[in-house]
Image (tube, rainbow, N blue to C red):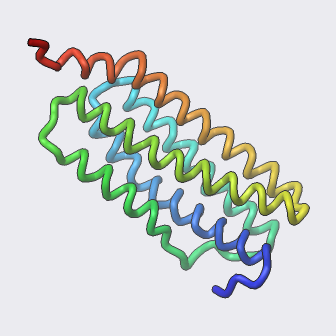
Amino acid sequence: MKLETLQDLLVHELKDLYSAENQLVKALPKMAAAATNEDLRAGFEEHLEETKNHVTRLEEIAEILGCKLTGHRCKAMEGLIEEGSELISEDAEDVVRDAALIGAAQRVEHYEIAGYGTARALAECLGYGDTVRILTETLDEERATDEKLTELAETTINVEAAELVDVE
């Protein structure tokens, strides 16, 4: 795809997000299954449902803009998911693996926050109010997920993992 206009760039960003979200729909159940902390597992399961809604919203935007979002593979998300999969297979204490899963999930969230923020800014510049509204809703959810992960890490999981340290 040749990027000649801001509209072309917006569609490119949307395709990237669509691929990323679809990859996450497949990865989140694996992350949930690997989590031993019930709150973390529930958070991954809840975010899976949100992620399915994100895919639907992107399809709604594609319909509004009259474009197709298929045919693109988000390599960044592919790499982030691969790193998360490697962490899952590591020989680790359960609570340490949970801490690692939070880190992997936050890398994903930060990537999505950047992508949705960029797409929203482009849509805003182009005057696509409905698209801006939809992207803002998703962006807000991604930020909320990141905040929940931070809170879970700081109040529970990292605290428990720190107790495993031998103090001499």
Residue, far left: 168
Residue drawn where x is 87% and y is 65% of the image: 126
Residue drawn where x is 49% and y is 68% of the image: 74
Q: In this rendering, would 143 be left or right of 106?
A: right
Task: Give how far across and how far down residue 34 sits, in percent.
Answer: 27, 39
Q: In this rendering, would 40 be left or right of 118?
A: left
Viewer-proximal residue, 122 or 23? Answer: 122
Res. 121 image quadrant:
bottom right
Viewer-proximal residue, 59 or 141? Answer: 141
Task: Give how far across and how far down residue 141 sits, in percent.
Answer: 63, 39
Residue, far bottom: 2
Quarter of the image where the C terminus is located: top left
Task: Give how far across and how far down residue 30 sits, in percent.
Answer: 32, 47
Task: Give how far across and how far down residue 63 sits, in percent.
Answer: 77, 68
* Number of marks in the rendered image: 0
Res. 7 image quadrant:
bottom right
Residue, far front: 168
Residue 101 to residue 161: above or below: below
Res. 72 image quadrant:
bottom right
Quarter of the image where the N terminus is located: bottom right
Residue 66 to residue 129: above or below: below
Q: In this rendering, would 67 be left or right of 13?
A: right
Residue drawn where x is 53% and y is 46% of the image: 110
Residue 92 to residue 152: above or below: below
Residue drawn where x is 33% and y is 39% of the image: 101
